[in-house]
Image (cartoon, grey):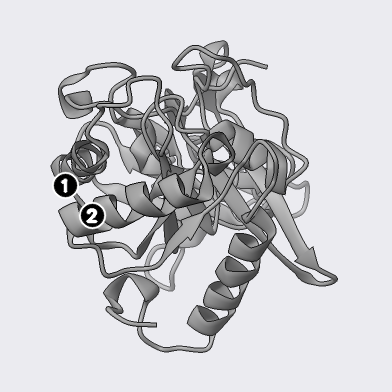
Amino acid sequence: MKFVDEATISVQAGKGGDGCLSFRREKYLPKGGPNGGNGGNGGNVFLIAKAGLNTLADFRYARVFRAKNGSSGSGRDRTGRGGEDLYIEVPAGTVVSDRDTDEIIGDITAAGATLLVAAGGRSGLGNAHFKSSTNRTPRKTTKGKAGDARQLRLELKVLADVGLLGLPNAGKSTFLRAVSQARPKVAEYPFTTLHPELGVVAVDVGRSFVVADIPGLIAGAADGAGLGIKFLRHLGRTRLLLHLVDVAPLDEQRDLAADVRAIITELERFGGDLAARERWLVLNKIDLLPEAEQRRRGDALLAALDWRGPIFHVSALSGAGCRELCQRVMTRLEQAEVQVQPVADQATW
């Protein structure tokens, strides 16, 4: 199924049923009094996160959703039937906002979680509700209220612990294939990844984490170059970023430090806290270089960047260094879970 990470839908909650005007008319009760019942409440509209659903593609075809109206009340003090609630299935990780006001209504992050997005209209009152000692034959009723109507913007942010960053052909998809069972497309040309890919990395029994690979970034992505930066939102929930760098590019004169700075610039232009989030440097494709040349290029890159964070040397193709990196990532994530301060705010580890 084609990956879709944004959608706009219209929701309409049900109208409340009207109150009933009725009097008892039995043979031996000529003045039986009012017995008009209240209407039923209108149905609500909920969004519910469905396990296994990972796209908003279904909303390309169904965009308008209406809950059932409540029924009107009737005589003999009978209340109308309430309108049935409507549940709309969405993937876990969906952020819901009002398209007209840009107000964020909620964030559905767990399978089975529900979010009320449109409340049903309240029921009207029958004339039995208005009877009193001074008004024994009320002829007053009220109409049911209309339900909420909203235009919603749905935005999917994948749920992952670790995000992969890098230029096209840095080896992110190959790395994901090496450490998980995910099988993203790999080819010798750029932009083979067209949408986010997820993989589960099993480090040991009961110890695993989720990695998200997004399409590669290039300089000017914030202005729409390449595939732009619209997929960066999918890294918003991650706790750690792995920045992959191709240390053996075809152009041997390529400035690797400039490539790293270009990605950092795009993170800053995207906004939020991505640029400040904990980020590890991963030098990939070491299998293409002699050991001495690996060290030389790595040292030159660190000096040019004045890099003081963690750095790893791996080959996603051969698997060299990948297992050790995943072990360190798992340990870091486990440490973060027992700390009060968020990972993104920590300068040391």
Asked whether residue 126 appears in the rendered view, the answer is no
Q: Nearer the viewer, residue 41 or 11?
A: 11
Q: Position of residue 170 (x, y in %)?
A: 45, 32
Does residue 131 appear left or right of residue 276 in this picture? right
**Residue at 25 percent of width and 52 percent of height:** 300
Asked whether residue 146 appears in the rendered view, the answer is yes
For disc 1, the neighbor class at 10 Å (few under 14, some 14 to 19, many from 20) is some
**Residue at 41 percent of width and 89 percent of height:** 340
Q: Position of residue 27 (x, y in %)?
A: 78, 46
Q: Is residue 198 above or below residue 308?
A: above
Q: Nearer the viewer, residue 229 or 253?
A: 253
Amino acid, disc 2: Ala
Residues at badges 1 and 2 in contact (C-beta under 8 Å)? Answer: yes
Quarter of the figure that contains the C terminus: bottom left
Q: Position of residue 319 (x, y in %)?
A: 69, 46
Q: Nearer the viewer, residue 139 or 31?
A: 139
Which numbered dot is residue 58? none
Amino acid, disc 1: Glu
Does residue 62 appear left or right of residue 247 in this picture? right
Mark 1 vs mark 2: which is more N-terminal?
1
Kindly identify which residue carries mark 1. 268
Quarter of the figure that contains the N terminus: top right
**Residue at 26 percent of width and 28 percent of height:** 254
Q: Is residue 222 above or below residue 187?
A: below
Kindly identify which residue carries mark 2. 275
